[in-house]
Amino acid sequence: MPSPQTLEAPPGPEAHGTQRTRVAVPWLFLVIIVALLAGRLLFGPQSASPALQTWATVFVAICVQALPFLVFGVALSAAISAFVPASFWTKALPKRPAVAVPVAGIAGAVLPGCECASVPVASGLISRGVTPAAALAFLLSSPAINPVVLVATAVAFPGEPLMVVARFTASLVVAVAAGWLWLRFGRTELLRIRRHEHSSFVEAMRHDLLHAGGFLIVGGLAAATLNVTVPREWLTTVADVPWLAILVLAALAVLLSICSEADAFVAASLTAFSPTAKLTFLVVGPMVDLKLIALQAGTFGRAFAVRFVPLTFVLAVTVSAVVGGILL
């Protein structure tokens, strides 16, 4: 007779309803696009409102920009789940969790993806036996210090190599510090991980893409709405106050939800702000933005997100101010 641990209750009506919701949510993106196009054709001048056009542009840009990297991350996560044995990770990372955290943080430098890709990858790592604190350090560092992002930063800030050095340093410090703090104070029951043993790569990828794609859309909707409601005049009035400028650009990074491969060009355009404030924008954005918050809450659970997101935000702002003050 099978042991109690191997018994599984058949899925009830709630489980089936949740599954149907996850399958349906990603189609919301296509429905919204069709609705925008239809509204433009049917209502003509009525749909030509600058605010509506800006909202539609921002929403589509966020989702279209992030979707390839999300697919990349989901594919990598599915490959980990389908092809890499769980025993590999116990051998690849140091056995001591406190040492595994910085190793995982540095490993984030080799993945050319944005924050949308890092969430499903981190989830896959945890489900395969990686210490959660190490996977979370990887989640934060990967979109911030990978080669594509660093090259984009160098191009956006020509003649300012210290901006690249400062971004790499501050982002890695935040990732490792967040991992260590979660290792010390985080509780396992707060981190919800669905341990699915898929029979094939395609099945694993389909499941993760349907799940993560819906939360990307939710984050994109929120970011687009806030983007058109924040007056631009507010930014210019606070640029001359150092500490306020840092906080404003940190908040702006959260609201705009720009992928890390493109955020350096936006930061460089904010000429009224100090280099340290721009650095804060570059460090906070890949670690805490609306679409990433939605992805984290959907993947790891709300109880995790309401604790980990504020921790990451405070660390990112503090470390950026310190590193910027020293290097910039």
Image (tube, rainbow, N blue to C red):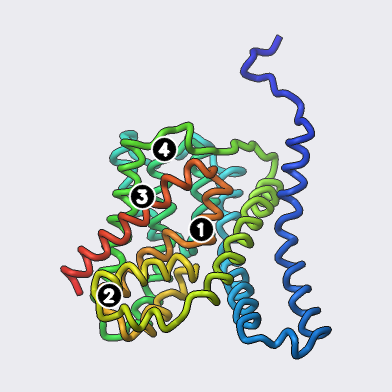
Residue, far top: 1
- Please tell me which of labels 4 and 2 falls first in the chain: 4
Residue that carries the numbered disc 1 in the rendered image: 292
**Is 241 on the left or on the right of 12, as rendered?**
left
Disc 1 is placed on an element classified as helix
- Please tell me which of labels 4 and 1 falls first in the chain: 4
Please tell me in which quadrant of the rendered image residue 33 appears.
bottom right
Residue in view at x 56 percent, y 64 percent: 69
Callout 2 amino acid: Met
Q: Residues within 10 Å of mark 4 (few under 14, many from 20)?
A: many
In the displayed structure, 3 sits above or below 44; it is above
Residue that carries the numbered disc 2 in the rendered image: 163
- Please tell me which of labels 4 and 3 falls first in the chain: 4
Residue nearest the observer in this picture, 202 or 303: 303
3D distance between C-alphas at marks 2 and 1: 24 Å
Q: Is label 3 or label 1 in front?
A: 3
Residue that carries the numbered disc 4 in the rendered image: 131
- Please tell me which of labels 2 and 1 falls first in the chain: 2
The image shows residue 312 at horizontal and vertical percentages of 37, 53
Q: Is label 4 or label 1 in front?
A: 1
Callout 3 amino acid: Leu
Disc 4 is placed on an element classified as loop
3D distance between C-alphas at marks 4 and 3: 19 Å
3D distance between C-alphas at marks 3 and 1: 14 Å
In the displayed structure, 13 sits above or below 156; it is above
- The label on residue 311 is 3
- Please tell me which of labels 3 and 2 falls first in the chain: 2
Looking at the rendered image, the quarter that the N terminus falls into is: top right
Disc 2 is placed on an element classified as helix
Callout 1 amino acid: Leu
Callout 4 amino acid: Thr
**Residue 155 seen in this snapshot:** no
